[in-house]
Image (tube, helix red, strand yellow):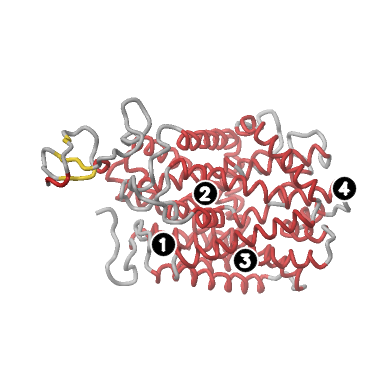
Amino acid sequence: MYTVRAVRGLFKGVNPRTTLITVVLMLAMLLLGTLWSEATARAIGSFRTHLNPFLEWYYVLLVAFMLLFMIWLGVGRYKNVRLGDDREVPEFRFFSWISMLFAAGTGVGILFWAVAQPIMQFQGNPFVEQGGSARAATVAMQLSFFHWGLHAWSIFSFVALVLAYFAFRKGQPLTISSALHPIIGKHAYGRAGELVDILAVVATIFGIATTLGLGVQQMNTGLGEVFGLDSSVRLQLFIIAVLMVISTVTLVSGVERGMRLISEANFWLSLTVAGAILVLGPTQYLIASTLEAFGEYLQNLLSLAFYTHANQQSDWQSEWTVFFWGWTMAWSPFVGMFIARISRGRTLREFVFGVLVVPTLISTVWIGLLGGSALYQELFGDGGIVEAVNEDVTLALFVTLEGMDIGFMGLVLSAVMTLLIGTYLITSANAGTLVVTTILAGGDADPPRRHRILWGVILTLLTGVLLLAGGLELLQSAVVAAALPFSVILLLMLIGTLRALHQERFAEGPGVRREAPHEPWVVNEQTGKRALAYDVERGRGLRKKNPSSQ
């Protein structure tokens, strides 16, 4: 028996001990961030300041190794291993799969930073002597691709692959702790495993609440641009309440229906917006600048991957690369588990291509179009984007659309972007709620509906309290610092995965099959029972026999 779930009462269908501890920890952290916000901010700020010299090379090394590890899994001897039985087919078609994983992964974040980050890097970065120049624009795009590309998705894809492998191929619960079974054995299903799962749940709750808060603030700005509404906490609370009601309804309807449909709608809407910006904007410049910056990104990928800012005294590395890698690691339980949930039946080769390469290309195009439009206005137009970003980051996207000087279509694009932010917030909230309830339900991929509704309400209330208390920036710092202990868990997961993969029999190698045999039935001479070959461990006195004779 892997998990302990209550069979009656308030905690029916979930682990009561894990759920209670999670609630208590969440309330304690919330009180610290609201009642003693200044003292907590100072403590967390001091902690991060002391950690930064270590994180500037540790996070860099860890994430670079994780990318190389994922590439090896996708092209190496285990590329044909399937996340499930050897003859299992994928649960979702490719388009639905990509739509959902991108919407849950970086959909909201990339809308927030697609303009803001290139413009902020354009003003100055360690790789150019003069900010605001043409060279600075190319490098700014290159750095944006770097922080939203292969490295970030290698973290998400690694956690997702490990969880899917142990859940669907090894038959273990869909929880973070299952990946530690090859290392700590049965303790993965005891108190040690529960501690790991609690850390993952807490990181997920506060990570999604922080993202919802930032997204709602940007959506409030969009409503102001389109309808002239003033920015206010009251309006933001109303927005989050409406979005979470829609999110809960779609989540209760199931991943196969509600979330799949809204994710696909997101994707088509995003393609429509991207196409409009390409056609209505400086088309030739957008294509040329994106290709040039992406080519430099690929050319300098190795040097960027191991850049540690060792000979510089500024805080650029800690404010950007360390922040993004730490934020991604803190988010990886949430994003990774959701991607695992929708990836059953894929081979490792399909998985690595779909989760590592495709989202990177999508992010490149999105940043190239939006960020490129902003940079074009700064270099060849009337500018104003830099001032807007320095004043309020949430203004960046809408000031860029306004500066395209396309009349009424600019207002239409702002309205569509505001809608897109809302739909991406819904899918992120869906994924976060599903992951929390799945972990608390001991890995049940279809957790009880009432708990999905309950945690949807809790996330709504938590986000509302954070908006009222102004604690979003505090939580951003806290989540990045919290990535440090989880990075140790990532290393343990990597070791456990290598141990488990070593037992795969249908992997490419000397004297080992690449795929399941054509005659799958075998008989165990000790028990006399017939079974499928890929379900029986290799070389334990097995003798092939005609299944019909049994």
Give the amino acid type for the residue marked by disc 2 in the picture: Ala
| Residue marked by disc 3 | 422
122 or 67: which is nearer to us? 67
Residue 485 visible, this orientation: no
Q: Tell me the crowding category of disc 2: few under 14, some 14 to 19, or many 20 or more residues within 10 angstroms, Cα based.
A: many
Mark 3 and mark 1 lie on one chain; the one further toward the N terminus is 3
Mark 3 and mark 2 lie on one chain; the one further toward the N terminus is 2
Q: What's the mark number on residue 330?
A: 2
483 or 89: which is nearer to us? 89
Q: Could you tell me which residue is drawn at 54 percent across and 62 percent down?
A: 427
Give the Cα separation between the discs numbered 3 and 2. Answer: 23 Å
Mark 4 and mark 3 lie on one chain; the one further toward the N terminus is 4
Task: From the image, state whether disc 4 or disc 3 is nearer to you.
Answer: 4
| Residue marked by disc 4 | 380
Task: From the image, state whether disc 3 or disc 1 is nearer to you.
Answer: 3
In-image side of 89 versus 43 (left or right): left
What secondary structure is marked by label 3?
helix
What secondary structure is marked by label 4?
helix
523 or 538: which is nearer to us? 523
List x then y, in percent, for residue 79.
43, 37
| Residue marked by disc 1 | 437
Q: Could you tell me which residue is drawn at 83 percent across and 58 percent down?
A: 403
Give the amino acid type for the residue marked by disc 4 in the picture: Phe
Give the amino acid type for the residue marked by disc 1 in the picture: Thr
Q: Tell me the crowding category of disc 4: few under 14, some 14 to 19, or many 20 or more residues within 10 angstroms, Cα based.
A: few
C-beta proximity under 8 Å, tags 2 and 4? no
What secondary structure is marked by label 2?
helix
